[in-house]
Image (spheres, rainbow, N blue to C red):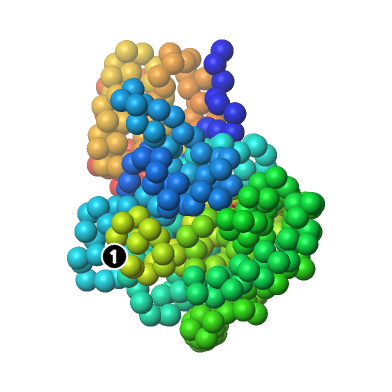
Amino acid sequence: MINKPRGTEDILPVDSPLWQKIEQAAREVCASYGYREIRTPVFEDTALFQRGVGDTTDVVQKEMYTFEDKGGRSITLRPEGTASLARSFIENSLYADPQPTKLFYLISCYRYEKPQSGRLREFHQFGIECFGGTSDATDAEVIALALSFFEKVGVKGLKLNLNSIGCPVCKKDYNEKLREYFGQHQDKLCETCHTRLEKNPMRIIDCKSEICSAIAKDAPKMIDHLCPDCKAHLDKTLAYLDAVGISYTIDSSIVRGLDYYTRTVFEITSDALGAQSTVCGGGRYNGLVEELGGKPTEGIGFAVGLERLIMILKSQNSDNLIPQNQPRIFFAAIGDNADIEAQKLVYALRQKNCYAERDLCGRSIKAQMKYANKLGAAYSMVLGDDEIAGGKAELKNMADGSVQIVALNPDEIYDIIK
Ligand code: ATP
Ligand code: MG
Protein backbone atom coordinates (compact mmCIF):
# COMPACT_ATOMS: atom_id res chain seq x y z
CA MET A 1 0.00 0.00 0.00
CA ILE A 2 1.18 3.53 -0.77
CA ASN A 3 0.69 6.01 2.07
CA LYS A 4 0.35 9.79 1.98
CA PRO A 5 3.64 11.72 2.08
CA ARG A 6 5.03 12.68 5.52
CA GLY A 7 3.59 15.93 6.82
CA THR A 8 0.43 15.84 4.70
CA GLU A 9 -3.15 15.19 5.74
CA ASP A 10 -6.32 13.93 4.10
CA ILE A 11 -9.26 16.15 4.90
CA LEU A 12 -11.96 13.53 5.27
CA PRO A 13 -15.70 14.01 4.56
CA VAL A 14 -16.44 14.08 8.30
CA ASP A 15 -14.28 17.22 8.64
CA SER A 16 -15.22 18.93 5.36
CA PRO A 17 -18.25 20.76 6.78
CA LEU A 18 -15.97 22.49 9.30
CA TRP A 19 -13.56 23.53 6.54
CA GLN A 20 -16.49 24.78 4.48
CA LYS A 21 -17.83 26.79 7.41
CA ILE A 22 -14.43 28.44 7.88
CA GLU A 23 -14.05 29.19 4.18
CA GLN A 24 -17.59 30.59 4.10
CA ALA A 25 -16.80 32.86 7.08
CA ALA A 26 -13.65 34.07 5.29
CA ARG A 27 -15.62 34.88 2.13
CA GLU A 28 -18.35 36.72 4.03
CA VAL A 29 -15.99 38.80 6.17
CA CYS A 30 -13.88 39.67 3.12
CA ALA A 31 -16.99 40.73 1.21
CA SER A 32 -17.99 43.17 3.95
CA TYR A 33 -14.48 44.66 4.00
CA GLY A 34 -14.31 44.83 0.17
CA TYR A 35 -11.59 42.18 -0.32
CA ARG A 36 -11.88 40.11 -3.52
CA GLU A 37 -10.61 36.61 -4.12
CA ILE A 38 -7.48 35.95 -6.15
CA ARG A 39 -6.10 32.54 -7.21
CA THR A 40 -2.48 32.20 -8.24
CA PRO A 41 -0.45 29.12 -9.31
CA VAL A 42 0.63 26.49 -6.79
CA PHE A 43 4.18 26.76 -8.17
CA GLU A 44 6.25 29.78 -9.13
CA ASP A 45 9.70 30.65 -10.35
CA THR A 46 12.05 29.95 -7.38
CA ALA A 47 13.52 33.45 -7.68
CA LEU A 48 10.15 34.94 -6.68
CA PHE A 49 10.40 33.49 -3.18
CA GLN A 50 14.15 34.03 -2.87
CA ARG A 51 13.58 37.72 -3.52
CA GLY A 52 10.08 38.10 -2.11
CA VAL A 53 10.40 36.09 1.10
CA GLY A 54 14.08 36.82 1.61
CA ASP A 55 17.08 34.55 1.45
CA THR A 56 18.03 34.89 5.12
CA THR A 57 14.70 33.44 6.28
CA ASP A 58 14.11 29.88 7.52
CA VAL A 59 11.52 29.47 4.78
CA VAL A 60 14.01 30.10 1.97
CA GLN A 61 17.11 28.66 3.65
CA LYS A 62 15.59 25.41 4.87
CA GLU A 63 11.96 24.84 3.99
CA MET A 64 11.28 25.29 0.29
CA TYR A 65 10.09 22.53 -2.04
CA THR A 66 12.33 23.39 -4.96
CA PHE A 67 12.91 21.25 -8.03
CA GLU A 68 14.01 21.53 -11.62
CA ASP A 69 11.27 20.92 -14.18
CA LYS A 70 11.80 19.12 -17.50
CA GLY A 71 12.65 22.43 -19.15
CA GLY A 72 15.50 23.05 -16.69
CA ARG A 73 13.67 25.84 -14.82
CA SER A 74 13.94 26.12 -11.05
CA ILE A 75 10.40 25.81 -9.69
CA THR A 76 9.18 26.12 -6.08
CA LEU A 77 5.87 25.08 -4.56
CA ARG A 78 4.52 28.22 -2.86
CA PRO A 79 5.53 28.33 0.82
CA GLU A 80 3.16 31.29 1.37
CA GLY A 81 0.85 33.60 -0.54
CA THR A 82 2.16 37.15 -0.25
CA ALA A 83 5.01 37.01 -2.78
CA SER A 84 2.72 35.41 -5.38
CA LEU A 85 0.10 38.11 -4.85
CA ALA A 86 2.67 40.89 -5.15
CA ARG A 87 3.89 39.31 -8.40
CA SER A 88 0.34 39.08 -9.72
CA PHE A 89 -0.40 42.67 -8.64
CA ILE A 90 2.54 43.87 -10.74
CA GLU A 91 2.18 41.44 -13.66
CA ASN A 92 -1.55 42.15 -14.15
CA SER A 93 -1.24 45.92 -13.56
CA LEU A 94 -3.75 45.80 -10.72
CA TYR A 95 -2.17 49.08 -9.55
CA ALA A 96 -3.98 50.76 -12.48
CA ASP A 97 -7.34 50.14 -10.74
CA PRO A 98 -8.59 52.63 -8.14
CA GLN A 99 -6.38 51.99 -5.12
CA PRO A 100 -6.09 50.25 -2.77
CA THR A 101 -6.21 46.76 -4.27
CA LYS A 102 -7.81 44.51 -1.65
CA LEU A 103 -7.29 40.79 -2.19
CA PHE A 104 -7.92 37.58 -0.28
CA TYR A 105 -6.86 33.98 -0.84
CA LEU A 106 -7.59 30.46 0.38
CA ILE A 107 -4.61 28.31 -0.55
CA SER A 108 -2.47 25.28 0.19
CA CYS A 109 1.19 26.00 1.09
CA TYR A 110 4.26 23.78 1.08
CA ARG A 111 7.19 23.88 3.49
CA TYR A 112 9.75 21.17 4.14
CA GLU A 113 9.49 21.28 7.93
CA LYS A 114 9.77 18.68 10.66
CA PRO A 115 6.17 17.45 10.94
CA GLN A 116 4.65 17.82 14.42
CA SER A 117 1.46 19.07 16.01
CA GLY A 118 0.40 22.22 14.11
CA ARG A 119 3.32 21.93 11.70
CA LEU A 120 2.77 20.21 8.38
CA ARG A 121 4.50 20.05 5.01
CA GLU A 122 1.27 20.77 3.19
CA PHE A 123 -0.99 23.16 5.07
CA HIS A 124 -3.67 25.71 4.25
CA GLN A 125 -3.96 29.43 4.71
CA PHE A 126 -6.64 32.06 4.54
CA GLY A 127 -4.94 35.38 3.93
CA ILE A 128 -5.51 38.92 2.72
CA GLU A 129 -3.31 41.62 1.22
CA CYS A 130 -4.04 45.31 0.80
CA PHE A 131 -1.78 46.98 -1.77
CA GLY A 132 -1.61 50.74 -2.16
CA GLY A 133 -3.44 51.77 1.00
CA THR A 134 -1.36 54.74 2.13
CA SER A 135 -3.33 55.68 5.25
CA ASP A 136 -2.43 54.32 8.68
CA ALA A 137 -6.07 53.25 8.89
CA THR A 138 -5.10 50.38 6.56
CA ASP A 139 -3.15 48.64 9.34
CA ALA A 140 -6.15 48.82 11.65
CA GLU A 141 -8.52 47.60 8.91
CA VAL A 142 -6.38 44.53 8.22
CA ILE A 143 -6.13 43.65 11.91
CA ALA A 144 -9.86 44.23 12.41
CA LEU A 145 -10.66 41.94 9.48
CA ALA A 146 -8.62 39.13 11.03
CA LEU A 147 -10.42 39.52 14.35
CA SER A 148 -13.86 39.73 12.67
CA PHE A 149 -13.06 36.48 10.90
CA PHE A 150 -12.15 34.69 14.13
CA GLU A 151 -15.27 36.05 15.78
CA LYS A 152 -17.46 34.81 12.93
CA VAL A 153 -15.88 31.36 13.10
CA GLY A 154 -16.63 31.33 16.84
CA VAL A 155 -13.13 30.83 18.21
CA LYS A 156 -12.49 32.16 21.69
CA GLY A 157 -9.57 33.29 23.85
CA LEU A 158 -7.27 34.65 21.13
CA LYS A 159 -4.61 37.27 21.83
CA LEU A 160 -3.43 40.00 19.50
CA ASN A 161 0.28 40.79 19.88
CA LEU A 162 1.70 43.70 17.96
CA ASN A 163 5.04 45.32 17.30
CA SER A 164 6.69 47.78 14.94
CA ILE A 165 9.92 46.76 13.27
CA GLY A 166 10.52 50.16 11.73
CA CYS A 167 11.54 51.19 8.23
CA PRO A 168 14.88 50.87 6.38
CA VAL A 169 15.96 54.19 7.95
CA CYS A 170 15.52 53.19 11.59
CA LYS A 171 16.38 49.55 10.92
CA LYS A 172 19.86 50.57 9.80
CA ASP A 173 20.85 52.08 13.17
CA TYR A 174 19.02 49.36 15.04
CA ASN A 175 20.80 46.59 13.12
CA GLU A 176 24.12 48.12 14.23
CA LYS A 177 22.96 47.95 17.85
CA LEU A 178 21.90 44.34 17.34
CA ARG A 179 25.25 43.43 15.76
CA GLU A 180 27.00 44.92 18.75
CA TYR A 181 24.75 43.02 21.19
CA PHE A 182 24.73 39.63 19.45
CA GLY A 183 28.44 40.04 18.63
CA GLN A 184 29.14 39.69 22.36
CA HIS A 185 27.40 36.28 22.28
CA GLN A 186 28.68 35.21 18.87
CA ASP A 187 30.31 31.96 20.05
CA LYS A 188 26.98 30.71 21.45
CA LEU A 189 24.76 31.48 18.45
CA CYS A 190 23.67 28.66 16.13
CA GLU A 191 25.34 28.28 12.75
CA THR A 192 22.51 29.90 10.78
CA CYS A 193 22.56 32.90 13.10
CA HIS A 194 26.28 33.37 12.50
CA THR A 195 25.53 34.36 8.91
CA ARG A 196 22.46 36.30 10.02
CA LEU A 197 24.66 38.40 12.30
CA GLU A 198 26.33 39.85 9.22
CA LYS A 199 23.43 39.89 6.76
CA ASN A 200 20.29 40.45 8.82
CA PRO A 201 20.73 40.41 12.62
CA MET A 202 17.01 40.99 13.26
CA ARG A 203 16.41 37.43 12.05
CA ILE A 204 18.24 36.13 15.15
CA ILE A 205 15.31 37.37 17.28
CA ASP A 206 13.08 34.98 15.28
CA CYS A 207 15.43 31.97 15.60
CA LYS A 208 13.72 28.84 16.92
CA SER A 209 16.87 27.51 18.67
CA GLU A 210 16.61 27.68 22.46
CA ILE A 211 20.02 29.25 23.02
CA CYS A 212 19.53 31.95 20.39
CA SER A 213 16.07 32.88 21.66
CA ALA A 214 17.36 33.02 25.26
CA ILE A 215 20.10 35.43 24.15
CA ALA A 216 17.58 37.41 22.09
CA LYS A 217 15.42 38.07 25.17
CA ASP A 218 17.74 40.85 26.35
CA ALA A 219 18.52 42.27 22.91
CA PRO A 220 17.80 45.97 22.24
CA LYS A 221 14.16 46.48 21.19
CA MET A 222 13.19 48.00 17.85
CA ILE A 223 10.25 49.73 19.44
CA ASP A 224 12.68 51.81 21.53
CA HIS A 225 14.61 52.83 18.41
CA LEU A 226 11.89 53.88 15.95
CA CYS A 227 12.40 57.00 13.83
CA PRO A 228 9.80 59.77 14.36
CA ASP A 229 7.78 58.73 11.26
CA CYS A 230 7.59 55.10 12.33
CA LYS A 231 6.71 56.09 15.88
CA ALA A 232 3.90 58.31 14.57
CA HIS A 233 2.65 55.49 12.36
CA LEU A 234 2.52 53.09 15.31
CA ASP A 235 0.72 55.61 17.53
CA LYS A 236 -1.86 56.30 14.82
CA THR A 237 -2.45 52.58 14.21
CA LEU A 238 -3.00 52.02 17.93
CA ALA A 239 -5.38 54.98 18.06
CA TYR A 240 -7.48 53.44 15.27
CA LEU A 241 -7.56 50.12 17.13
CA ASP A 242 -8.50 51.87 20.38
CA ALA A 243 -11.31 53.69 18.55
CA VAL A 244 -13.06 50.40 17.75
CA GLY A 245 -12.27 48.73 21.08
CA ILE A 246 -9.70 46.22 19.82
CA SER A 247 -7.31 45.23 22.61
CA TYR A 248 -3.71 44.29 21.97
CA THR A 249 -0.40 43.67 23.68
CA ILE A 250 2.81 45.23 22.43
CA ASP A 251 5.33 42.38 22.06
CA SER A 252 8.79 43.49 21.06
CA SER A 253 9.91 39.94 20.31
CA ILE A 254 7.73 39.75 17.19
CA VAL A 255 9.88 40.32 14.11
CA ARG A 256 8.04 37.86 11.81
CA GLY A 257 9.65 35.11 9.78
CA LEU A 258 9.78 36.82 6.41
CA ASP A 259 12.23 39.49 5.31
CA TYR A 260 9.91 41.94 3.64
CA TYR A 261 8.13 43.32 6.70
CA THR A 262 8.31 46.98 7.73
CA ARG A 263 6.63 48.84 10.58
CA THR A 264 3.51 47.03 11.85
CA VAL A 265 3.88 43.31 12.53
CA PHE A 266 1.38 41.24 14.48
CA GLU A 267 0.50 37.75 15.56
CA ILE A 268 -2.69 36.25 16.89
CA THR A 269 -2.09 33.41 19.32
CA SER A 270 -4.05 30.80 21.25
CA ASP A 271 -3.12 28.95 24.43
CA ALA A 272 -4.90 25.91 23.00
CA LEU A 273 -2.12 25.32 20.48
CA GLY A 274 0.87 24.43 22.65
CA ALA A 275 4.27 25.13 21.10
CA GLN A 276 2.91 26.25 17.71
CA SER A 277 0.73 28.93 19.28
CA THR A 278 0.47 31.37 16.37
CA VAL A 279 -2.69 30.97 14.34
CA CYS A 280 -2.32 34.21 12.37
CA GLY A 281 0.71 36.24 11.37
CA GLY A 282 0.75 39.48 9.47
CA GLY A 283 2.32 42.81 8.87
CA ARG A 284 3.26 45.63 6.60
CA TYR A 285 5.71 45.09 3.74
CA ASN A 286 6.30 48.41 2.06
CA GLY A 287 9.44 47.23 0.24
CA LEU A 288 8.06 44.07 -1.35
CA VAL A 289 6.42 45.32 -4.56
CA GLU A 290 9.47 47.39 -5.40
CA GLU A 291 11.76 44.45 -4.58
CA LEU A 292 9.84 42.42 -7.17
CA GLY A 293 10.17 45.05 -9.88
CA GLY A 294 7.05 47.15 -9.34
CA LYS A 295 6.68 50.80 -8.36
CA PRO A 296 7.05 51.51 -4.63
CA THR A 297 3.70 50.45 -3.18
CA GLU A 298 2.51 50.14 0.38
CA GLY A 299 1.33 46.69 1.36
CA ILE A 300 -0.05 44.97 4.41
CA GLY A 301 -1.74 41.63 5.05
CA PHE A 302 -1.97 38.52 7.17
CA ALA A 303 -2.24 34.75 6.85
CA VAL A 304 -4.18 32.37 9.08
CA GLY A 305 -3.07 28.75 9.39
CA LEU A 306 -6.30 26.82 8.90
CA GLU A 307 -5.14 23.50 10.39
CA ARG A 308 -4.14 25.37 13.55
CA LEU A 309 -7.49 27.17 13.60
CA ILE A 310 -9.31 23.83 13.35
CA MET A 311 -7.18 22.45 16.21
CA ILE A 312 -8.33 25.36 18.41
CA LEU A 313 -11.98 24.96 17.41
CA LYS A 314 -11.93 21.25 18.14
CA SER A 315 -10.31 21.80 21.53
CA GLN A 316 -12.83 24.46 22.55
CA ASN A 317 -16.20 22.85 21.95
CA SER A 318 -18.20 20.54 19.82
CA ASP A 319 -20.74 23.22 18.84
CA ASN A 320 -18.38 24.12 16.09
CA LEU A 321 -18.42 20.63 14.72
CA ILE A 322 -21.07 20.98 12.12
CA PRO A 323 -23.78 18.35 11.71
CA GLN A 324 -23.21 16.18 8.70
CA ASN A 325 -25.46 16.30 5.64
CA GLN A 326 -28.31 13.89 6.41
CA PRO A 327 -31.03 12.68 4.02
CA ARG A 328 -34.43 14.29 4.38
CA ILE A 329 -35.91 10.98 3.25
CA PHE A 330 -34.87 7.38 2.64
CA PHE A 331 -36.85 5.17 0.27
CA ALA A 332 -36.67 1.45 1.08
CA ALA A 333 -37.86 -0.84 -1.69
CA ILE A 334 -39.12 -4.45 -1.83
CA GLY A 335 -39.20 -5.96 -5.34
CA ASP A 336 -38.32 -4.74 -8.82
CA ASN A 337 -41.30 -2.39 -9.35
CA ALA A 338 -40.68 -0.67 -6.03
CA ASP A 339 -37.01 -0.38 -6.86
CA ILE A 340 -37.86 1.58 -10.02
CA GLU A 341 -40.35 3.76 -8.08
CA ALA A 342 -37.68 4.53 -5.45
CA GLN A 343 -35.36 5.53 -8.29
CA LYS A 344 -37.98 7.92 -9.72
CA LEU A 345 -38.74 9.51 -6.34
CA VAL A 346 -35.12 10.10 -5.24
CA TYR A 347 -34.39 11.59 -8.67
CA ALA A 348 -37.37 13.98 -8.56
CA LEU A 349 -36.56 15.14 -5.01
CA ARG A 350 -32.87 15.60 -5.76
CA GLN A 351 -33.90 17.81 -8.70
CA LYS A 352 -35.50 20.05 -6.05
CA ASN A 353 -32.20 20.26 -4.11
CA CYS A 354 -33.57 17.89 -1.50
CA TYR A 355 -31.20 15.17 -0.26
CA ALA A 356 -33.12 11.90 -0.85
CA GLU A 357 -31.42 8.53 -0.51
CA ARG A 358 -31.95 4.88 -1.48
CA ASP A 359 -30.01 1.65 -1.16
CA LEU A 360 -27.22 0.99 -3.64
CA CYS A 361 -25.88 -2.23 -2.13
CA GLY A 362 -28.72 -4.76 -2.67
CA ARG A 363 -29.67 -4.81 1.03
CA SER A 364 -32.60 -6.73 2.50
CA ILE A 365 -35.54 -4.57 3.65
CA LYS A 366 -34.40 -4.88 7.26
CA ALA A 367 -30.88 -3.85 6.37
CA GLN A 368 -32.21 -0.92 4.28
CA MET A 369 -34.02 0.47 7.34
CA LYS A 370 -30.94 0.01 9.50
CA TYR A 371 -28.95 1.94 6.88
CA ALA A 372 -31.59 4.73 6.84
CA ASN A 373 -31.17 5.05 10.61
CA LYS A 374 -27.39 5.16 10.36
CA LEU A 375 -27.56 7.94 7.79
CA GLY A 376 -29.84 9.89 10.11
CA ALA A 377 -32.68 10.23 7.58
CA ALA A 378 -35.45 12.55 8.80
CA TYR A 379 -38.19 10.52 7.07
CA SER A 380 -38.48 7.10 5.51
CA MET A 381 -40.90 5.36 3.17
CA VAL A 382 -41.16 1.63 2.43
CA LEU A 383 -42.25 0.82 -1.12
CA GLY A 384 -43.67 -2.58 -2.14
CA ASP A 385 -46.08 -3.94 -4.75
CA ASP A 386 -49.18 -2.86 -2.73
CA GLU A 387 -47.93 0.72 -2.44
CA ILE A 388 -47.15 0.88 -6.16
CA ALA A 389 -50.60 -0.50 -7.03
CA GLY A 390 -52.39 1.92 -4.65
CA GLY A 391 -50.25 4.93 -5.55
CA LYS A 392 -49.66 5.82 -1.89
CA ALA A 393 -47.48 4.78 1.04
CA GLU A 394 -46.71 5.43 4.72
CA LEU A 395 -44.35 8.33 5.31
CA LYS A 396 -42.61 7.80 8.63
CA ASN A 397 -41.10 10.57 10.73
CA MET A 398 -37.95 8.90 12.06
CA ALA A 399 -37.63 11.17 15.10
CA ASP A 400 -41.04 10.49 16.72
CA GLY A 401 -42.16 7.39 14.82
CA SER A 402 -45.40 9.03 13.62
CA VAL A 403 -46.74 8.00 10.20
CA GLN A 404 -49.07 9.47 7.61
CA ILE A 405 -50.32 8.18 4.28
CA VAL A 406 -49.17 10.22 1.29
CA ALA A 407 -49.46 9.87 -2.47
CA LEU A 408 -46.35 8.70 -4.37
CA ASN A 409 -45.99 12.19 -5.73
CA PRO A 410 -42.67 13.98 -5.27
CA ASP A 411 -44.31 17.43 -4.93
CA GLU A 412 -46.58 16.26 -2.12
CA ILE A 413 -43.77 14.41 -0.37
CA TYR A 414 -41.51 17.43 -0.72
CA ASP A 415 -44.07 19.76 0.87
CA ILE A 416 -44.05 17.62 4.01
CA ILE A 417 -40.36 16.78 4.37
CA LYS A 418 -38.63 19.96 3.12
P1 ATP B 1 5.93 29.52 12.75
O1 ATP B 1 6.64 30.52 13.56
O2 ATP B 1 4.90 28.75 13.53
O3 ATP B 1 6.84 28.64 11.94
P2 ATP B 1 5.66 31.25 10.49
O4 ATP B 1 6.11 32.56 10.99
O5 ATP B 1 6.59 30.40 9.71
O6 ATP B 1 5.06 30.38 11.70
P3 ATP B 1 3.87 32.44 8.59
O7 ATP B 1 4.80 32.32 7.47
O8 ATP B 1 3.60 33.76 9.18
O9 ATP B 1 4.28 31.40 9.74
O10 ATP B 1 2.47 31.77 8.18
C1 ATP B 1 1.23 32.23 8.71
C2 ATP B 1 0.52 31.14 9.48
O11 ATP B 1 0.52 29.92 8.75
C3 ATP B 1 1.18 30.75 10.79
O12 ATP B 1 0.82 31.64 11.80
C4 ATP B 1 0.62 29.37 11.04
O13 ATP B 1 -0.67 29.44 11.58
C5 ATP B 1 0.53 28.81 9.64
N1 ATP B 1 1.69 27.93 9.36
C6 ATP B 1 2.95 28.29 9.01
N2 ATP B 1 3.73 27.22 8.81
C7 ATP B 1 2.93 26.14 9.00
C8 ATP B 1 3.13 24.71 8.92
N3 ATP B 1 4.31 24.21 8.57
N4 ATP B 1 2.09 23.90 9.20
C9 ATP B 1 0.87 24.40 9.55
N5 ATP B 1 0.62 25.72 9.64
C10 ATP B 1 1.62 26.59 9.36
MG1 MG C 1 7.79 28.78 10.16
For disc 1, the neighbor class at 10 Å (few under 14, some 14 to 19, many from 20) is few
Q: Quadrant of residue 47?
A: top left
Left or right placement of residue 403 versus residue 3 in this view? left
Q: Please say if 393 is above or below 256.
A: above
- The spot of residue 328 in percent (x, y) is 41, 40
Q: Quadrant of residue 2?
A: top right
On the question of residue 354 being in view, the answer is yes
Left or right placement of residue 230 versus residue 27 in this view? right
Residue at 73%, 47% in the rendered image: 190
Q: Please say if 409 is above or below 241.
A: above
- The spot of residue 237 in percent (x, y) is 50, 81
Q: Quadrant of residue 27?
A: bottom left
Q: Closest to the observer: 174 or 68?
A: 174
Residue at 36%, 40% in the rendered image: 45
Q: Disc 1 marks which amino acid? A: Lys
Q: Closest to the observer: 250 or 295?
A: 295
Q: Please say if 210 is above or below 76.
A: below
Residue at 49%, 52% in the rendered image: 54
Residue on which the image places disc 1: 295
Q: Please say if 386 is above or below 312.
A: above
Q: Closest to the observer: 418 or 406?
A: 418
Left or right placement of residue 74 versus residue 281 in this view? left
Residue at 38%, 58% in the rendered image: 291
Q: Closest to the observer: 86 or 109?
A: 86
On the question of residue 32 being in view, the answer is no
- The spot of residue 283 in percent (x, y) is 50, 66
Q: SS for tag 1? A: loop
